[in-house]
Structure formats: C-alpha cells, structure tokens
Amino acid sequence: MEVHAHTHTSRKKWTHYFWEFLMLFLAVFCGFLAEYQLEHKIEKERARKYMYDMVENLKYDTIRYNRNLVNNETIGKQLDSLRAEISHAVNGQINGNRLYELWLKCSDFNSVVFNRTAITQLKNSGSFRLIKNDVMSSSISDYYERKISACEDQEEKLRRSNERLSISSARFFYYEPFDQMLSTETTFKELTPDSIISRNNKILNSDPPLTLLNNNPADLKLLYNDVAINENNMKEYNAYLRWARETAIALMQEIDKEYHFKK
C-alpha cells in the first residue's frame, strides 16, 4: 500500500493580513474622499448658481426701485400741490381746472413687485445651508425677511389710504366732462396716449372752469385730511423703498466680493 505524503502550505504571517486590510481600508477611504470631494464641488457650484441668480434678482429689484421712486416722487409733489389747492378752496379761492388736473394725476401710485425667485428656490430646496459665509447669510435674511416685508407693509398702508382718498374724492369731482372721451372711443383700440393727453388738456382748460360737486369748507377740510394722510404715506413708502434699495445694492456687492462674478 502506497503512503502519500501530505503537503503542508506555509501559514501566512499576520503582517500579510494587516497589509491586505490596510489596502482595502485605503481603497474604501479614498473612494469616500473622492465622493465627498465631488459632492462638495457640486454643492459649491449649486451655491454659486443660486448666488448668481440672486444677484440678477437684486438687479431687477434695483431697477424697479429706481423707476417707481421717480414716479412716486412726482405723484407726491402733485399730492402736495393738490393739498395746497384744497386749502385755497377752503378759503373760497376755488381753481376748478387746477383741482381736477391734480386730482387726475394723484389717483394712483407705483408699487415695487420684488423678484424672490432665487431666495424661494434656495429655501424650498433646503440649500440655504450651502451659504457658508454667516455674515452674508444674515444679510440675505435681513433683506428678504426684514427690508422687503417692511416695504410691503408700508405699501399696504398706502394702498388703503389711496382707496380712502379715491372714495372721498368722488364727493367733489364729477367725471361728466370726460364723457366725450369715453363715448368716442368705446373700445379704446385707436386711443393713443397722445390723444388722451390732448383731450384731457382741452377739458382741463375749460372756460368757464370745471366745478366741484361740493364746495362746503367743512367737507373740503375732510378731503384735505385724506390728501395729507395719503401724501404722508406716499413719502413713508418712498423712504422704505430707498432704504431697501441701499440694502439690495450692498448685498450685491457683498455677494460679488465672495463669488467674483464676471461683469
């Protein structure tokens, strides 16, 4: 009977297993680092894109501030003139044509519609955490949560006083002289701004002058109050817009300093 000798394989040293473990650990760890770096890069790019969009939103807001402030400041001056004319009327010096002219010019105001696209996306996606600069994140919150909210609150206050003035004005100003313009162009398809101004000017230079529905001094004083309140609210709203505009400009500069966007 044959006897077979068993071959014995040499046992691996513990250092061999250690190096195998170390190589595996390093492979996993390096993969983790690569994934982390990639994710970090993607987040930085996302944050940069959000900030770029925010700057574009702020540019839009700034344009709206500038345009609406110019218009509102003009309307504010007209309200001031209307208030002075009503004061003369209280004392019996009624300039009907001038009162009607100012009444038409003071019937409305311009409000800023803010562009919140970037900040809304930033918050809804949970990406506000991507802004690592704490000072900048505070500035962003200050603009969107404080400055804009204050402007909108003041706008609502102005809107209410403007509506009140519109209602009280109906007791004094009669639109019948403007009926010809309304009846001539029922569809307004061919009515141009120039023709509106031309026809208005003709009416506002009426001879004899246009008359008020009510020239009672006590009632005119109440109208004076409504004009004064609306004028004050208009000036306050404009002040809030200027305040927010300066914040928007400063925030754009702060973001640009952090991200160095190309002009």
Image (cartoon, helix red, strand yellow):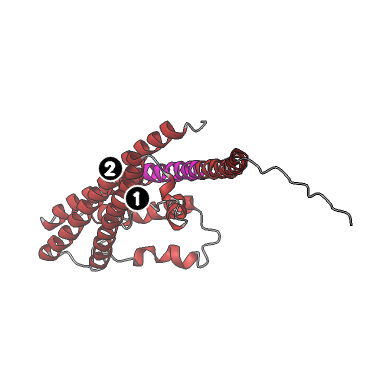
Residues at discs 1 and 2 in contact (Cβ within 8 Å): no
Q: Identify which residue, 249 or 206, lies in the foreground.
A: 249
Residue identifier under label 2: 243
Where, by quadrant of the figure, is residue 149 drawn? bottom left
Does the segment drawn in magenta span residue 57?
yes
x and y, in percent, of residue 61 in the image: 41, 46
User: Is the residue marked by circle 1 packed among few (<14), some (14-19), or many (20+) residues within 10 Å?
Assistant: some
What amino acid type should be assigned to the residue bearing mark 1?
Tyr
Instruction: Tell me, for residue 133, which label it has, or none.
Output: none
What amino acid type should be assigned to the residue bearing mark 2?
Trp
Q: Residue at x 25, y 64 (%)?
A: 169
Residue identifier under label 1: 144
Q: Residue furthest front?
A: 1
Secondary structure beneath label 2: helix
Q: Identify which residue, 47 or 220, lies in the foreground.
A: 47
Task: Check the image and report above or below for 135 versus 88.
Answer: above
Task: Write the start and end of the magenta stretch as one range.
Answer: 46-67
Give the CA distance from mark 1 to mark 2.
13 Å
**Mark 1 or 2: the one toward you:** 1
Which of the two labelled residues, at mark 1 and mark 2, occupies the earlier sequence position?
Answer: 1
Secondary structure beneath label 1: helix
Q: Is residue 235 visible?
A: yes
Q: Residue at x 23, y 68 (%)?
A: 171
User: Is the residue marked by circle 2 packed among few (<14), some (14-19), or many (20+) residues within 10 Å?
Assistant: some
- Judged left or right of residue 12, residue 61 is left
